[in-house]
Image: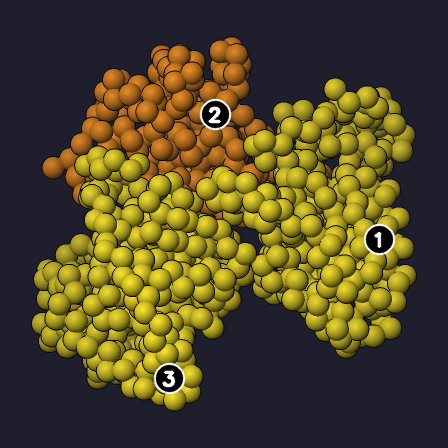
Chain colours: A orange, B yellow
Amino acid sequence: MKKTFNILVCGVGGQGTLLASNIIADAAMDSGYDVKKSEIHGMAQRGGSVTSHVRFGEHIESPIMRKGECDILLSFELLESVRSIGFLKPGGTLITNTQKILPMSVSAGGQVYPDNILDVFAESSIKFTAIDAIGKALELGNQKVLNIILLGVLSKQLPEISVETWENSIKKLLKPKLHELNLKAFNLGRNYN
Amino acid sequence: MNNSAKKAFLSGNAAIARGAWEAGCKFAAAYPGTPSTEIMEFCGTYDEIDAQWAVNEKTAMETVIGACFGGTRAICSQKHVGLNVAADPFFTASYIGVNAGLVIVTADDPGMHSSQNEQDNRYYAMMSKMPLLEPSDSQEAKDMTIEAFEISERFNTPVLIRTTTRVSHSETIVQLGERREQPEKEFVPDMNRYCTLPNISRQMHVKVEKRALELEKYAAEESKFNYITMGDPKIGIIASGVAYRHAKEAFPQASFLKLGMSWPYPNELIKRFASKVQKVIVIEEGDPFIEKAVRTLGINCVGKNLVPLCGELNPDILSEVLSEVVSPHLPVKTGIKHTELASEVPVPGRPPVLCPGCPHRGIFYVLSKLKCIVTGDIGCYSLGAYAPHNAMHSIVCMGASITTAMGLSKAMKDKIKGKLVAVIGESTFMHSGMTSLLDTVYNKGNHLTIILDNSITAMTGHQPNPASGKTLKGEPAKSLDFVKVCHALGISKVSTVDPFDLKAVETLVKARLQDDEPSVIIAQRPCYLLKDYKPKIRKVTIDIDKCVKCGMCLKVGCPAVEVDPVDKKTRLNMALCVHCGLCAQMCKPGAITQEQEEN
C-alpha cells in the first residue's frame, strides 16, 4: 500500500504554478501512483490567487485535500504562502519563494503587505525553506524558470520520485528548445540548501 | 493525442472530448463559457471532429441538432447559464429525438468561480424528459460520453451530461480506447419525424413519456453507472458527481449507492439500497435533486437539511456537517490539526484585476470620471465594477447591458438622461447584443452603447470569434464590421476610438451623452495578452523627484502603478508595466512620461 501524498501549489496567476503542478502530477503518474489534480481557473487572466491541489497514492478519491493534510506546500509568493498555510499538516514542509507581488489592495495604498511573514514561519513548528527563486532564475538568464527551480527544491523532499522521472516529465511538458535551461534550473533548485 | 496510448492524465473537459472522439462523433459546436470551454477546444484538436465556435449557445445547439438530423453523431457543450440561452431548441430536441446520437453537456459552476449564479441544471433533464449522466471524475466523463451516444441512439433521445467545476477542471488518470467509426445515417425528409407542428408534437409527447419509463427501467436495472457498494450497513450514502468522491474520502467505511445516471430516477434501485441500510444520507452538489426522489419514495433521509445548498462541497465540509449523524455509527475524521498561522498575519485579499495594458481600463476611467450610470455585461470588463473605477452598476446576463439600459431610461426618463451608458464586449455583442440594439432603435431608446472590441473572447481564455477573422480550427474567416452592423441596425451615430487615448474617449463620450438618439462608440484595441499581438512600444518612465503624491495616476487602477509605503510617492513596477501610457496621461506634474517616438 503506497502512502498518500498531498502537495499544494500556490501563487499568483501568471507565475507558472500550473506548469509546476502539471509536472508533479506527471512525475507521480510515471512513478506508478494514482493521481488527482485540481485547480480553478478563476475570473480574469492574471493577477488573482491560484492554488492547485496535487494528490497521489495507491488510490485517490477526492481531488481536494483536507485542511491539515498537506505534506508539502509549494508557494510561489510570500503572501500566498500565508493564505494557504492552513492546509499544511503540523510538522509539514513549506517551500516558499521570497518574492512579493503586491495585490491591488496594497499597491493602491489601502492595505498593508505584512513584513513579518518569514519571522512567523521561523518561530513556528513547520519545516520551511525560503528561496529567492526570481534571483536564482535571473542568474540563469530567464525569470520564467523560477517555477522549475522551485520544483527542484520540492523534488528533494520526495525521494519516492526519481531524478530521472522528474527530468523526463520536465522534458515531456516543455518544448525541446527549453529543455537545457529548465534542466539546469531544476538541478539548481535540487541542490539548493 | 489522437494515438491511443494506454492512459493519459486528462481534465474532465478533455475526457469528454476524448469520449466523443472514441464514440465516432464527427461534429461539435459550443459558445465558450467557464467551466465548459475546454471541451470544444479539445474537440478541435481531433482531425475527425468538425468543431466550431458558435456565436451563442442557441446557434450551437441548433447546429448540432441539424448535424444529428444529418446522420452524424454530434455534441455541444455550454456552461450552466449557457443552457438557458439554448433552452428553446433543447426542449424541442427532446420531443424530436435523434437520427444519429446527440449529446449535450452542461458544465455547472457551484461556488460561482466564474459565473453569475449557481443554478442546478439537472432540473433541465427532468423538465425536458432527457436522460441525465453525472460523471465524478475524468474516467467517468469519458466513459459516460461514449455511453451517452449509445443511450441516445437506443432510446431515440438527446442525452444531457452534467459536470460541475471540480469535474470539468480536475485532472485524473484515464484509460484510453480506440475510435469506433459509426455508419452514416441517411436523412430522409419526414414531416412526422422532424416537424414539430402541434398535431405531430402531440404524438411526440406521448412517445417521450413512454421513453421516460423505459429509461427509468434502464437506469435502475441496466446502467453500469448506477451501483451499490456495501460497506457498513449502518450508514448508506446516495451520492452523485464529484460529491461522491468527497463522500468516499470523508466516510470510506459507509455503504454507497453511486448514481451516475440520476434521471430518470432509478426508483427501484434506490428502494433496494434503502432496504439494506439503517440510515440514508443523500450527498449531492447543488439542489436536493436526488433527495427529492428519495423522499417521494417515502424513504426518510438526511440531505440538504445538513449538507449546504450553496457553494461547492469538499471532504472537510462533509465531515463537519454530517459528523453528528455519522459519528455514533462510524468513525469520522474531523478537526484534523493543521498549521494555524494565518491569524497571526493579516492577509490582504488578492481579487482579480484588469491586466496591465488592458484596453478596457481607459474606458472605465472616463465613465467613472463622468459619473455615468453604467449597465454592464458578461466578460473581463465586469471587473470595471470594482474599485477604483466602480463604473458598472448592473450585471444580469449575456447581452443584457443594452436592453437593461433602455429599461432604466424608460423608467427614469430625465433623471438619467445624459448619464446612461451600456458597456458590452464585442463577443457578447455578437452573442446577444445585436438584437438588443435593434430593440433599442425600434423602441426609441436613447442611451449610448460602448462596444469594447478587443478582437477575442478573452475571459474564457482567448477563443476566436467572428471579430477575430479565424475559426476554432485556425482557418481564416470573414471578420465582422461592427460599424456597418450598427448602421444597419439603425444607429446613425457610430464612432470608433482608441481606448488608450483618454482625451479622445472623454470628448467623444461627452458629446454622445448630449444626443437625443441611441448611439454607439466602438473602442478598438486588441487584448494585450493576444499571442500574435505585438504593439509598437513607447516607453513609460518615472522621475520620482517630480512626483507630488497627487494620486491621479492611481485612478486608472493599474497593478503596475504602486505607492511606496515609506515616501508615499508613486513607483512603477516595471516587471508588470507594458507601457500602455495611461498613467503618463494622468500625470500633470510630468513625473511619469511616455516617449513620443515608437520603437
Residue B426 as seen in the image, left or right of residue B316: right
Label 2: which secondary element: strand
Residue B448, image x and y in percent?
Answer: 79, 60
Subunit of label 2: A
Could you classify mark 3 by the number of other residues whose Cα lies within 10 Å: few (under 14), some (14-19), or many (20 or more)? some
Residue B315, image x and y in percent?
Answer: 30, 53
Label 3: which secondary element: helix
The disc at residue B201 is 3
Q: Residue at x 78, y 47 (%)?
A: B496
Q: Is residue B539 above or below residue A39?
A: above
Residue picked out by circle 2: A97
What is the three-letter code of the residue carrying label 1? Val
The answer to whether marks 3 and 1 sit on the same chain is yes
Q: Is residue B142 above or below residue B223?
A: above
Q: Residue at x 77, y 32 (%)?
A: B581
| Residue A105 visible from this viewpoint | no
Q: How many numbered tags mark residues here?
A: 3
Could you classify mark 2 by the number of other residues whose Cα lies within 10 Å: few (under 14), some (14-19), or many (20 or more)? many
Between label 1 and label 2, give the one nearer the viewer: 1
Is there CB contact under 8 Å for labels 2 and 3?
A: no
Subunit of label 1: B
